[in-house]
Image (cartoon, rainbow, N blue to C red):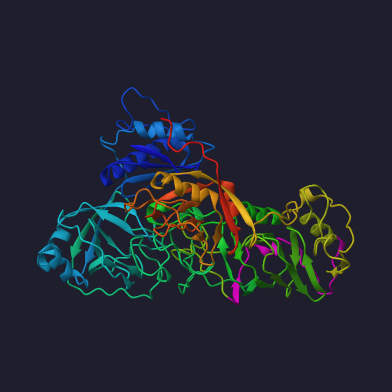
């Protein structure tokens, strides 16, 4: 058991093989459940070692566990868990003893009509009937999640199954296809490209947003395939999600092996909005089928890219990445400015160009990359020259220019956007297409409880005294100094909005504490130190977990040269280019292992891919280093053409225990 720090909030535990990895995963899950109940089951720790659950238990801060081919990735909150103590506790787990886990048996009916069935039979020297009998005659075990939500690598079948992947991967594999690759079997949960040998099809959905949990097969489950006579047809248009072993052209694929060759912030349209979950604490339960609510605003033009994001989701064992805002601090600031809870869904834009129209009186805020933010109404154009809350009246239009520096902005509205949720999150996952689709031109959006958030101006354009009072209360800063009911008084020179001249200072707010209207946060100037095209930004990293796969010269080249952000970058990751490709010491193929945001993976061409929030759950190339938390947020603001240097900020590669 080898412990490899993966940044400051994760441990990659390397083991002898898949069986050991699955045993450790099962032991960890049992131990985590014990920590939640402050009870340690017998057999999970060595005799004589007393480990109490609760706040002092290292497992209390574990946030996610991702098993893979011969590793287990353990993510934790450093505020609650010490890395060395966690490693020591992991080392002490009895992975050979009986470990209880919440597994089930899943029976999957299969029509063995796959295109590669005869070829697999010829390869193994068997008849097609024998292939069917052996594939369905053994129970398979769900090992770990894979390249798409609902895909699970199945192991433990008949020992005869060890088949190579196709030399020429298919660009179109239907949902429900049952395949073989190496010693694994699996079921494609959605249309995709793929290189597995296809032996059959099933009509049982591997992923259903309305199910709880959405993934039919979980790690540790037993899977049995049942031959059926009926021909099964799985229809659907081909998306661009690929398994992480496909060797197809990168333009057809968005995976760790293909280095995510897509246009900046490009995201494929899957022709639907994800099913809405009414309660984020009950993701996967009955979905809302109510009619689309009346629009409170319309996205006239999303610009280069715009989508809903929040704090993300945790479902890596189902093949689902975390997603969430690329620049969390700026996202939280936008919500704070309009008085929302920090994790309320907001619109994340990339590259500017967004235009929207308000249909009700709304309080909004724009944060992030410095840009020209304007509001065009009947009284002229207002420039919003700092990060602050401002009022929009019905019919007024907001426009966001291309950022002067940085790359992403966040638009929050008081009350929050009424965005559909999947697995408790409204974040758009651009890698798998999970969650709300990217915003399109002329998209109507609803806002939660807008009618009670701000006072409405009367038809004659004036505000009665009591409404002026209420408005000032709603827009009062924490310092006690007011902003305006229409725009910030320091930023709107002499413009009359709602019958009042907000080009001059307003009287102090009165009675803000007793007001039922939410207050707004402290305005902030636009940041002046964000990355820009042609400039160099230094990002702090911690080395590992796979820096030992590179030569000393490779490590030197990683740290000493400037890397350029290429246009083939998006929310999945930044594809970097440098003059000297990184030299590897170890040329072996790396078995798939867990990935995290901020991981810097080095494909075979020696040019880094810096993973952002929509990173794949697992990857197949060595990670040379991981960004620190603050560096990851800064990386979310890197535009194409910006240059990057990496600065080592390492606290030791391996755990001391």
Q: Is residue 397 above or below residue 86?
A: below
Q: Position of residue 192 (x, y in %)?
A: 36, 69
Q: Is residue 39 among what the camera can see? A: no
Q: Is residue 128 magenta?
A: no
Left or right: 643, with 45 as reference point? right
Quadrant occupied by the C terminus: top left
Q: Position of residue 209 (x, y in %)?
A: 42, 62
Left or right: 295, with 577 as reference point? right
Q: Which residues are magenta?
A: 441-465
Q: Position of residue 150 (x, y in %)?
A: 36, 60
Q: How many marks?
A: 0
Between 619 and 109, the one lying in front of the other is 619
Please give the name of the residue rendered at 60% of the width and 73% of the height, measured from the top-left corner: 444
Q: Is residue 423 among what the camera can see? A: yes
Residue 213 location, quadrant: bottom left
Left or right: 475, with 174 as reference point? right
Q: Is residue 86 above or below residue 452?
A: above
Please give the name of the residue rendered at 26% of the width and 67% of the height, measured from the top-left corner: 166
Left or right: 175, with 573 as reference point? left
Between 645 and 464, the one lying in front of the other is 645
Q: Main secondary structure of the magenta part?
A: loop
Between 359 and 532, the one lying in front of the other is 532
Q: Position of residue 127 (x, y in %)?
A: 9, 67
Quadrant occupied by the N terminus: top left
Q: Is residue 461 magenta?
A: yes
């Amino acid at each position: 058991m080898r412990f490899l720090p993966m940044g400051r909030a994760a441990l990659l535990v390397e083991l002898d093989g898949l069986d050991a990895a699955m045993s450790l995963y099962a032991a960890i899950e049992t131990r985590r459940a014990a920590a939640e109940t402050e009870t340690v089951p017998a057999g999970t720790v060595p005799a004589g070692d007393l480990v109490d659950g609760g706040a002092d238990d290292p497992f209390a801060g574990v946030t996610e566990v991702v098993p893979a081919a011969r590793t287990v990735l353990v993510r934790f909150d450093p505020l609650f868990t010490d890395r060395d103590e966690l490693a020591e506790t992991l080392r002490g787990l009895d992975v050979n003893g009986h470990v209880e886990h919440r597994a089930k048996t899943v029976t999957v009916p299969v029509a063995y009509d796959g295109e590669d069935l005869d070829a697999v039979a010829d390869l193994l020297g068997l008849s097609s009937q024998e292939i069917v009998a052996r594939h369905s005659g053994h129970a398979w075990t769900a090992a770990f999640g894979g390249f798409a939500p609902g895909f699970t690598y199945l192991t433990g079948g008949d020992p005869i199954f060890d088949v190579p992947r196709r030399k020429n991967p298919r660009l179109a594999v239907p949902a429900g296809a049952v395949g073989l690759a190496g010693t694994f079997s699996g079921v494609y949960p959605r249309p995709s490209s793929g290189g597995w040998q296809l032996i059959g099809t099933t009509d049982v959905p591997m992923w259903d947003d309305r199910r709880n949990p959405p993934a039919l097969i979980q790690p540790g489950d037993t899977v049995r395939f049942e031959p059926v006579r009926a021909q099964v047809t799985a229809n659907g248009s081909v998306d661009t999600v690929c398994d992480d072993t496909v060797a197809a052209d990168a333009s057809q694929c968005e995976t760790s092996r293909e280095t995510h060759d897509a246009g900046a912030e490009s995201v494929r349209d899957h022709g639907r909005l994800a099913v809405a979950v009414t309660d984020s604490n009950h993701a996967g339960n009955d979905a809302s089928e109510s009619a689309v609510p009346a629009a409170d605003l319309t996205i006239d033009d999303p610009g280069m890219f715009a989508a809903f994001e929040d704090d993300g989701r945790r479902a890596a064992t189902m093949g689902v990445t975390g997603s969430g805002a690329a620049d969390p601090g700026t996202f939280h600031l936008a919500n704070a400015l309009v008085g929302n809870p920090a994790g309320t869904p907001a619109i994340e834009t990339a590259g500017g160009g967004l235009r929207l129209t308000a249909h009700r009186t709304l309080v909004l805020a724009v944060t992030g990359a410095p840009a020209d933010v304007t509001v065009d109404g009947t009284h002229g154009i207002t420039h919003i020259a700092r990060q602050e809350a401002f009022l929009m009246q019905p019919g007024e239009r907001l426009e966001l220019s291309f950022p002067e520096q940085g790359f992403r902005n966040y638009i929050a509205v008081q009350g929050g956007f009424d965005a559909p949720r999947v697995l408790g999150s409204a974040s758009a996952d651009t890698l798998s297409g999970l969650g709300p689709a990217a915003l399109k031109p002329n998209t109507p959006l609803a806002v939660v409880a807008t009618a009670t958030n701000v006072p409405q101006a009367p038809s004659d354009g004036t505000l009665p005294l009591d409404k002026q009072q209420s408005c000032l209360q709603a827009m009062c800063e924490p310092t006690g100094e007011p902003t305006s009911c229409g725009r910030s008084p320091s930023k709107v020179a002499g413009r009359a909005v709602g019958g009042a001249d907000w080009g001059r200072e307003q009287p102090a707010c009165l009675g803000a504490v007793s007001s039922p209207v939410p207050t707004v946060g402290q305005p902030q100037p636009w940041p002046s130190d964000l990355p820009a095209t042609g400039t160099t930004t230094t990002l702090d990293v911690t080395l590992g977990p796979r820096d030992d796969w590179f030569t000393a010269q490779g490590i030197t080249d990683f740290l000493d040269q400037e890397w350029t952000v290429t246009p083939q970058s998006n929310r999945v990751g930044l594809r970097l280019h440098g003059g000297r490709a990184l030299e590897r010491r170890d040329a072996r193929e790396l078995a798939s292992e867990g990935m995290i945001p901020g991981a810097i993976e080095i494909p075979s061409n020696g040019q880094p891919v810096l993973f952002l929030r929509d990173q794949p759950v697992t990857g197949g190339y060595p990670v040379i280093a991981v960004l620190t938390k603050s560096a990851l947020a800064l990386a979310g603001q890197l535009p194409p053409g910006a240059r990057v240097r990496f600065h080592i900020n390492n606290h030791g590669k391996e755990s001391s225990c």
